[in-house]
Amino acid sequence: MSTERHPRHRLDEVIHSPLRLSIVSALSAVEKAEFRAVRDAVEISDSLLSKQIALLEQAGYVAVHKARVERRPRTWLALTDVGREALVAHLAALADITQGHRTALPAAGTGSTETYAPPARV
Amino acid sequence: MDVPTRREVESTLADANGARTTLAARGGWLRKYLLVFAVGSVAVVLLIGLGGRTGATVATMLWLFLVAAMSWWGARQRVIPRGHKLRNLLGFGGWGVLYGATLLVGKSFFPSEPAFWVPAAVLSAVPLVLVAFWPSRRSEGQRRGGVATARNP
């Protein structure tokens, strides 16, 4: 089997980070959400979320829109079509990795490999 | 890129699912918003149809208060659920058609007749109730739990 065919090559480098995957997944469930709502859902600090959003915005995965409600500034975040496609592709790659019975995955905390049985929810 | 371990994938997907579920749940306000208008519509139609001049005045004031209060409440929400524009358009569009037809037919042919106005009042709320429960709790739950599938991002 060619190395290039392995699904790990289809993992998206931007949302491979668990934190950014959580942000993108959360935003995929809604049309848009205010910054603080995403912060609370993902359970991270303002500054960390700001950094992650900057990376996602740079990649074109998240659109940032600022508005005022009752004179208070609000930052709205929305998943773009490009971001949604990236999420679909990334999840598909993860599913292929975890469901590929022929794929030997490294066992956690060891250098050894195990034949992988897909988890129920993947 | 390194291949993630089984434990890493499971943990990552569980976290992503949790964040998705939490944020999606905060979009549930739209259902309440639409249901409040549905109940308000029943009251307004009954007041207009069976309450005479006073009823019509009270109905107008009630509806204006409802629109102002719900607009204020809606603007303060921090999560906008998917499809909220379409749901509002279909719900209030359908309501407008039924409400207009009810007043036209009721005032012309069935003035102060409960046999017409009571079912008509309930009927006027149907579009709002339908879009309030669309998508259904079940399909919403499937979506919420669906982060781990590529088909349901």
Image: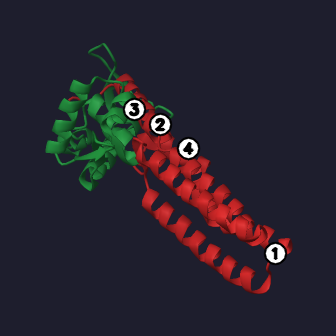
Q: Quadrant of residue B128?
A: bottom right
Say whether residue B32 is left or right of residue A8.
right
Contact (Cβ within 8 Å) of mark 3 with mark 4: no
Labels 1, 3: one chain: yes
Q: Amino acid at mark 1?
A: Ser
Residue B109 is situated, as x and y percent measured from the top left of the image, at 78, 86
Q: Is residue B136 visible?
A: yes
N-term-proximal mark, 3 vs 4: 3
Contact (Cβ within 8 Å) of mark 1 with mark 3: no
Give the position of the C terminus of chain A as an image quadrant. Answer: top left
Query: According to the colouring, which chain is green?
Result: A
Between B45 and B137, the one lying in front of the other is: B45
Name the disc covering residue A67, or none: none
Residue under numbered circle 2: B21
Labels 3, 2: one chain: yes
N-term-proximal mark, 1 vs 2: 2
N-term-proximal mark, 4 vs 2: 2
Name the disc covering residue B13, or none: 3
Labels 1, 2: one chain: yes
Q: Residue at x 33, y 17 (%)?
A: A108
Chain ID at mark 3? B
Question: Which numbered mark, 3 or 2, is in the foreground of this view?
Answer: 2
N-term-proximal mark, 1 vs 3: 3
Badge 1 marks a residue whose secondary structure is loop
- Distance (Cα) linking label 1 and label 3: 59 Å
Between A37 and A52, the one lying in front of the other is: A37
- Distance (Cα) linking label 3 and label 4: 16 Å
Between A79 and A105, the one lying in front of the other is: A79
Label 1 packing within 10 angstroms: few (<14), some (14-19), many (20+) = some
Badge 4 marks a residue whose secondary structure is helix
Residue B31 is situated, as x and y percent measured from the top left of the image, at 56, 50
